[in-house]
Image (spheres, rainbow, N blue to C red):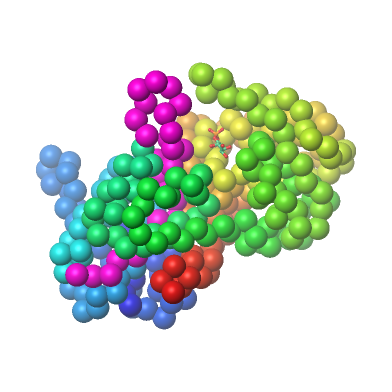
Amino acid sequence: MIVLGGSASNGIDIHLARELGADLVKLATTRFPDGEIKVTVPDIKDDDVVIVQSTYHPQEKNLFELLLAARFLKDRKADITAVIPYLAYARQNRSFAEGEAVSINTVMDSLSASGVKSIVTVNPHRSGSLMYFRGKVGVVNCEKTVAEALSGKLGDPFVLAPDKGGLEMAKKASAILKCDYTYIEKHRDAYGTVSVEKTHGGNFSRKDVVIFDDIISTGSTISQASRFAYSEGASSVSVAGIHLVMANGALEKMKNAGIERIFGTNTIPCSSAEIIDISKDIASGVKKVRG
Ligand code: R5P
């Protein structure tokens, strides 16, 4: 087995090769004068290839790099597994308004057509969306690893999910942190403005609240949840996000909302957070999907 690291593997390729006992080679990506990318795959003397490429910003370039490499290896009859730690375009998993194109099925179709046989991804926004992929799918849920890394770092913790969809993650994290958990009702209007209404139980008074969420994008969800937690008596608020997209001034917004510490994983590079390596979880996911 060979691990082929793409330009957006964020070091996970190195850890993964070590975990899997595989050799690591790197893709070379350059640009033509007109901005198009050119991908060069090194000479690989193995038909069992694990390509590692996260699809954070610039999403299209990173995704296309992966597709180009896979298509090249397909012609050489390689058995290709794509490890995509952060899977972009997963949130547009349906038409929310008339005429809106669904993006995740296009991404999944493209990977299938490019010869990828299996994909492994981390905490995808909706696992169900991966059914569009015509191969094996490995979903890595890493909230346990994140919660373990937080153990002992928060005084008197209380886990908060910023919406009902995050309840399962909050439950698992709270079991590891040995504390209570709850979720709040979140609404996002047509302009993207987030508001939170009420919790479903739990007493935040003098608690060190840690908000668990799969994605921190604009930081609006987390910021509103933080304000709510403080209004209910929290001593401090921290956040644990799996994918730190951190778009549109998210950091400033979160600081203004009183968030003290930001924890996240290495699926996306982020210099403003305390980063937890989840390569071991990914290695287990790769082993499982490949049987
Ligand atoms: C929504 O369902 C997700 O779990 C996140 O809460 C959301 O994507 C975060 O987005 P933002 O940071 O822009 O509020």
Q: Is residue 152 magenta?
A: no
Q: Residue at x 25, y 63 (%)?
A: 27
Q: Residue furthest left?
A: 33
Residue 238 seen in render: no
Whether residue 117 can be seen here: yes
Q: Position of residue 199 (x, y in %)?
A: 77, 33
Quadrant containing ligand 1 reads top right
Assign the magenta stretch its main secondary structure: loop
User: Horizontal and vertical percent for residue 38?
Assistant: 16, 53
Q: Nearer the viewer, residue 175 or 59?
A: 175
Q: Compared to 129, does 95 lie above or below?
A: above
Q: Is residue 84 magenta?
A: yes
Q: Is residue 191 left or right of residue 131?
A: right
Q: Is residue 169 toward the left or the right of residue 11 in the image?
A: right
Q: Which quadrant does the N terminus fall into?
A: bottom left
Residue at figure coordinates x 23%, y 70% from the top left: 78
Q: Judge by depth and name the residue closer to the eye, 91 or 33.
A: 91
Looking at the image, residue 166 sits to the left or right of residue 8; the answer is right
Task: Determine the image quadrant of residue 9.
Answer: bottom left
Quadrant into which the C terminus falls: bottom left
Total labels drawn: 0
Magenta highlight range: 77-102
Q: Is residue 201 left or right of residue 12?
A: right
Q: Where residue 97 sits: x, y (%)?
A: 43, 22
Residue drawn at x 19%, y 48% is 37
For residue 192, above or below residue 83: above
At x 19%, y 70%, the residue is: 77
